[in-house]
Image (cartoon, grey):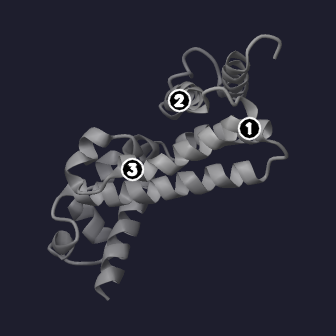
């Protein structure tokens, strides 16, 4: 039963974050959503930061599943990179509060969760896929691609593109980012 309570609290936190944004993720709101007393979370989540980190962990798992599914449905490593990049941006657009929380290491640092380590497999999957396409220094190339795609995702999820262009440009921006990083890493003639 106790682990069930922890899971209920985390699930309630995920729902509130997705529906109400970061302002909705409070201990009081989570206990109300989970249907438990206000003191119930203390054993598992003594601080809001601890609860937020547990919610962010769920987001990392969900993001990882989206990237993995996108890659598995692709016919080649190059197609997998495109699909993963699109899935990353789509996750950010569909779940902007979760996307933002996942990367708030400053907020989550004191939670006892090591989210940086937990996010490492996502980066390693990108590095491995890139290694099949651009084998020269795939870790650096993965870092370049991630920063490019993350920028697109962050701008898209906050609707920053809207004053400049409609969102129909986003898929082309993603394709260009992937293409340009791979071409640069592969050298002349690609």
> Mark 3 sits on what residue?
117
Q: Is residue 37 left or right of residue 77?
A: left
The answer to which image quadrant residue 50 occupies is bottom left
Q: Is residue 56 left or right of residue 108?
A: right
> Mark 2 sits on what residue?
143
* Disc 3 element: helix
> Mark 1 sits on what residue?
132
Q: Position of residue 9 (x, y in %)?
A: 32, 70
Whole-angstrom CA distance, mark 1 to mark 3, is 24 Å
Asked if the residues shown at circle 2 and circle 3 are in contact, with their CB atoms under 8 angstroms apart, the answer is: no
Does label 2 or label 1 sit earlier along the sequence?
1
The answer to which image quadrant residue 172 occupies is top right
**In the rendered image, the vertical position of residue 99 relative to residue 139, given as above or below:** below
**In the rendered image, the vertical position of residue 142 relative to residue 45, given as above or below:** above
Residue sitting farthest toward the bottom? 1
* Disc 2 element: helix
Instruction: Identify the mark at residue 17; answer none if there is no mark.
Output: none
* Disc 1 element: helix
For discs 2 and 1, the disc positioned in front in the rendered view: 1
Residue drawn at point x = 54 percent, y = 47 percent:
122
The N terminus is located in which quarter? Answer: bottom left
Q: Is residue 170 left or right of residue 140?
A: right
Whole-angstrom CA distance, mark 2 to mark 1, is 15 Å
Does label 1 or label 3 sit earlier along the sequence?
3
């Amino acid at each position: 039963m106790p682990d069930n309570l922890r899971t209920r609290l985390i699930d309630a936190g995920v729902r509130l974050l997705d529906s109400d944004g970061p302002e909705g993720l409070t201990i009081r709101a989570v206990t109300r959503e989970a249907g438990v007393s206000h003191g119930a979370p203390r054993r598992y989540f003594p601080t809001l930061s601890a609860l937020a980190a547990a919610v962010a962990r769920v987001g990392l798992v969900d993001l990882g599943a989206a990237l993995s599914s996108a890659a598995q449905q692709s016919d080649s490593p190059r197609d997998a990179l495109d699909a993963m990049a699109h899935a990353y941006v789509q996750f950010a657009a569909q779940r902007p509060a979760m996307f933002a929380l996942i990367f708030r290491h400053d907020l989550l640092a004191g939670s006892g969760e090591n989210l940086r380590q937990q996010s490492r497999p996502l980066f390693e999957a990108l590095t491995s896929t890139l290694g099949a396409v651009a084998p020269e220094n795939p870790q650096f190339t993965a870092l370049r691609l991630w920063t490019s795609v993350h920028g697109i995702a962050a701008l898209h999820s906050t609707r920053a593109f809207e004053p400049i262009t409609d969102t129909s440009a986003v898929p082309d921006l993603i394709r260009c980012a992937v293409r340009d990083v791979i071409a640069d890493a592969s050298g002349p003639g690609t």
